[in-house]
Amino acid sequence: MTQISMLESALAMFEVDCQRFPTSTEGLAALVDQPNNCPNWKGYLPKGVPNDPWGNPYKYEYPGQHNQKSFDLWSFGPDGQEGGGDDIVNWSQK
């Protein structure tokens, strides 16, 4: 959850500077590499986008299916598989 919170903060800064969230196609890479249509972009993750604690990339979708006015951000958790009760998500508290 700590990394998800850090990524949420970086996404919030991106939104302030670019007046939007990254698209699903741009993904979290937009926090590291400037998109063409965001002249006020400042760079938000100088060390790059981290993988989850189990070495897998985080999943990102905008607009979110769960957070329809913002984005969904999640990890499949320790088993690396969707579902199974161990997913770590930004749309509910466990």
Image (cartoon, rainbow, N blue to C red):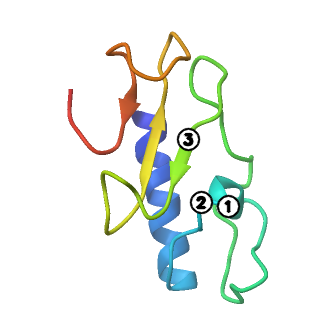
- Indicate the position of residue 39 as horizontal and vertical percent values: 72, 89
Compared across the picture, whether 25 is left or right of 84 comes to right
Where 34 falls versus 71 (above or below)?
below
Three-letter amino acid code at the position of disc 1: Thr
Q: Which mark is residue 59?
A: 3
Q: Tag 1: Cα neighbours inside 10 Å, few (<14), some, or many (≥20)?
A: few
Specify which label sits upstream in the sequence, 2 or 3: 2
- Indicate the position of residue 86 as horizontal and vertical percent values: 37, 16
Where 45 falls versus 82 (above or below)?
below
Q: Give the alpha-carbon distance from disc 2 to disc 3, as whole Å.
A: 9 Å
Identify the residue shown where x is 44% and y is 67%.
Answer: 12
Q: Give the alpha-carbon distance from disc 3 to disc 1, as whole Å.
A: 11 Å
Identify the residue shown where x is 45% and y is 46%.
Answer: 73
Three-letter amino acid code at the position of disc 3: Lys
Three-letter amino acid code at the position of disc 2: Ser
Q: Secondary structure at mark 3?
A: strand
Q: Which mark is residue 41?
A: none
- Indicate the position of residue 94 as horizontal and vertical percent values: 21, 26
Compared across the picture, whether 92 is left or right of 51 comes to left
Q: Secondary structure at mark 1?
A: loop
Instruction: Please name whichever residue, 81 or 73, is drawn nearer the observer in this view of the structure.
Output: 81
Q: Which residue is mark 1?
A: 25
Quadrant (top left, top right, bottom left, bottom right) of the N terminus: top left
Compared across the picture, whether 37 is left or right of 65 comes to right
Q: Which residue is mark 2?
A: 24
Q: Tag 3: Cα neighbours inside 10 Å, few (<14), some, or many (≥20)?
A: some
- Indicate the position of residue 42 as horizontal and vertical percent values: 68, 75
Q: Is there CB contact under 8 Å for labels 1 and 2? A: yes
